[in-house]
Image: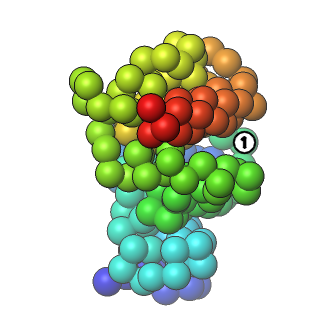
Amino acid sequence: MLKFNRPGAPEQLTDEQLLGKYLSGSDSRHLGQLYERYMPMVYGICLKIMRDPGKAEDAVMNIYEELTRKVKEHEIGYFRGWLYVLARNHCLMEWRKNHRRPTDLHEDMGRYDAVEEAFQYELPKDGTPLEKCMDELPPQQRNSVQWFYYEDKSYKEIAELIAEDVKKVRSYIQNGRRNLKICLENGKES
């Protein structure tokens, strides 16, 4: 169970001072003090998104671990606002990862039953219809579909891997699914 400091406890250093001390000396105690101030806010964000107290508590701890890395990578002007966005994005990604179904992403993709069935029950192994169809896809489509469905990479992660816009990645995945559907359905007719 998470423990929060009582409100009204005197705070000696500002957020900026604690952050500066952490960044200059990497003493995690300073970052811990700073994070403690906002743990109730972070927990509230996590609970609102995840709707499960246990998962929200886990997320609060995971966000702290993420914070220790990301705080060094970003220029932070207003810590509370920056932390709010970090916590919200972390929880949304976790929620999406745990609740994502391929058809959630594109309303018009629900009609690709043959592809859905193949993704659910068949790993792309040599000689399977899915593997043969995957091999026929253009490289951008094949890689995007592979990364998205089998390696659980987000659109953004894929976009960074191939140095493309997120919209282009969505297009690769959607077109790849359509081409897989056509290929799989043509294989069933043969």
Q: In this view, does 99 lie to the left or right of 85?
A: left
13 and 170: which is toward the camera:
170
Q: In this view, does 164 lie to the left or right of 52?
A: right
Which quadrant would residue 8 be assigned to in this image?
A: bottom right
Say which quadrant the C terminus sits in.
top left
Could you tell me which residue is drawn at 65 percent across and 54 percent down? 111
1 and 52: which is toward the camera:
52
Q: Vertical placement of 64 versus 161: above or below?
A: below
113 and 139: which is toward the camera:
113
Classify mark 1: residues with Cα within 10 Å, few (<14), some (14-19) or many (20+).
Answer: few
Work out whether residue 174 can be spotted.
yes
* Residue 92 x %, y %: 58, 60
Q: Is mark 1 on a helix, strand or loop?
A: loop
Could you tell me which residue is drawn at 67 percent across and 50 percent down? 109
Could you tell me which residue is drawn at 49 percent across and 17 percent down? 136
159 and 62: which is toward the camera:
159
* Residue 168 x %, y %: 72, 25
How many numbered discs sit on the rendered protein?
Answer: 1
Work out whether residue 161 can be spotted.
no
Residue, far left: 126
* Residue 137 x %, y %: 53, 19
Q: Vertical placement of 22 versus 87: above or below?
A: above
* Residue 170 x %, y %: 68, 34
In the rendered view, how is the structure colored?
rainbow
Q: Vertical placement of 24 versus 161: above or below?
A: below
Say which quadrant the N terminus sits in.
bottom left
Q: Vertical placement of 96 versus 178: above or below?
A: below
Which quadrant would residue 135 be assigned to in this image?
A: top left
User: Residue flagged by tag 1: what amino acid is it?
Assistant: Gly
Which residue corresponds to mark 1? Answer: 77
